[in-house]
């Protein structure tokens, strides 16, 4: 039965809407389209920056975007809010990572900027040994990862002034050491993206997270928090799962997220998003 009250739903992308192979399950596409037809509002709420919201995702149809883990908000296609990392903090981070050979990505709304050795490191993690393994070469030829095409390499200097957030790959430097070094400048969480490695991470502006963006948006739209739902799978979803009236963890979610969620749906491959929408009357 369809809800009489219009709801606003905040949907994570990686591991929630999008499978690791870069495909959105047909059931999830169907659920999103039908929920909007039924009058509900759907917002992407992701750690990704705008440049990483590919047409295959946008074309499903959403009412807006909370990107960069709360640092950027669009209503429809119009920017509403944008908070950037200070140039001083970018410089400190770039120098720290470069001297310790940590590969990283600076995210802006127009491009993703990779550190000098990022490309071969990331390709090894995605495809395997491209120099010696024909199967890895074939994987790259047949299934080029869309993330790689969005990256810009070869910048001599990465002291940028339009950075939303930062991601870094697993390295010889322990995650906790990186977190401690950047404390006060960035909030560090372990990455929700498998190709970055178990000790890869995301760095965000302190105090900025998905719930922060959601609260700003709800206030602007004059929508009650009681009419909100959130669905996600990773550690950067913790705040929004706790903040929204109903917080739903995917079956494939991180254990910490499942512990704070109001409920747990099925895995992404098992129609988890569709089943949660049906349960809450967003679709029928």
Image (cartoon, grey):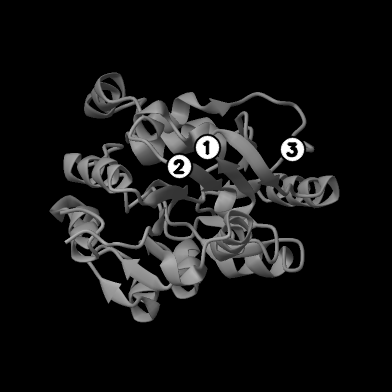
Tell me the SS state at disc 2. loop
* Residue 40, x across and y down, in percent: 36, 51
Q: Can I make out residue 282 in this image? A: yes
- Say which quadrant the N terminus sits in: bottom left
- The numbered mark at residue 162 is 3
For image coordinates 60% across by 46% down, the residue present is 73
For image coordinates 60% across by 58% down, the residue present is 213
Say whether marks 2 and 1 touch (CB < 8 Å). yes
Which residue is farthest bottom?
259
Label 2 – label 1 distance at C-alpha: 5 Å
Q: Quick check: 235 left or right of 164?
A: left
Tell me the SS state at disc 1. loop
Tell me the SS state at disc 3. loop
Residue that mark 2 sits on: 63
Q: Nearer the viewer, mark 3 or mark 1?
A: 1
The foreground one among 258 and 225 is: 225
Q: Quick check: 83 left or right of 212?
A: right
Residue that mark 1 sits on: 76
């Amino acid at each position: 039965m369809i809800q009489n009250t219009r709801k606003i739903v905040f949907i994570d992308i990686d591991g929630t809407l999008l499978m690791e192979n870069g495909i959105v399950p047909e059931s999830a596409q169907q659920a999103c389209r039908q929920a909007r037809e039924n009058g509900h509002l759907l917002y992407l709420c992701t750690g990704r920056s705008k440049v990483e919201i590919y047409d295959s995702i946008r074309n499903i149809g959403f009412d807006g975007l909370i990107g960069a883990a709360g640092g950027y908000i669009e209503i429809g296609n119009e920017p509403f809010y944008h908070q950037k990392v200070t140039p001083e903090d970018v410089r400190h981070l770039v120098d720290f990572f470069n001297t310790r050979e940590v590969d990283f990505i600076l995210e802006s709304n127009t491009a993703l900027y990779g550190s000098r050795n990022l490309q071969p490191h990331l390709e090894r993690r995605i495809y395997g040994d491209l120099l010696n393994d024909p199967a890895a070469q074939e994987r790259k030829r047949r299934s080029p990862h869309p993330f790689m095409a969005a990256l810009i390499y070869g910048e001599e200097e990465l002291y940028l002034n339009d950075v939303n957030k930062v991601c870094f790959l697993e390295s010889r430097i322990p995650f906790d050491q990186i977190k401690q070094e950047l404390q006060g400048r960035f909030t560090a969480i372990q990455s929700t993206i498998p190709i970055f490695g178990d000790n890869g991470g995301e760095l965000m502006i302190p105090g900025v997270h998905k719930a922060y963006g959601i609260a700003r948006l709800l206030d602007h739209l004059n929508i009650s928090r009681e009419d909100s739902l959130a669905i996600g799978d990773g550690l950067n979803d913790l705040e929004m799962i706790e903040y929204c009236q109903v917080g739903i963890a995917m079956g494939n979610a991180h254990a910490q997220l499942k512990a704070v969620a109001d409920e747990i749906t099925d895995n992404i491959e098992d129609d988890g998003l569709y089943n949660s929408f049906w349960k809450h009357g967003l679709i029928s």
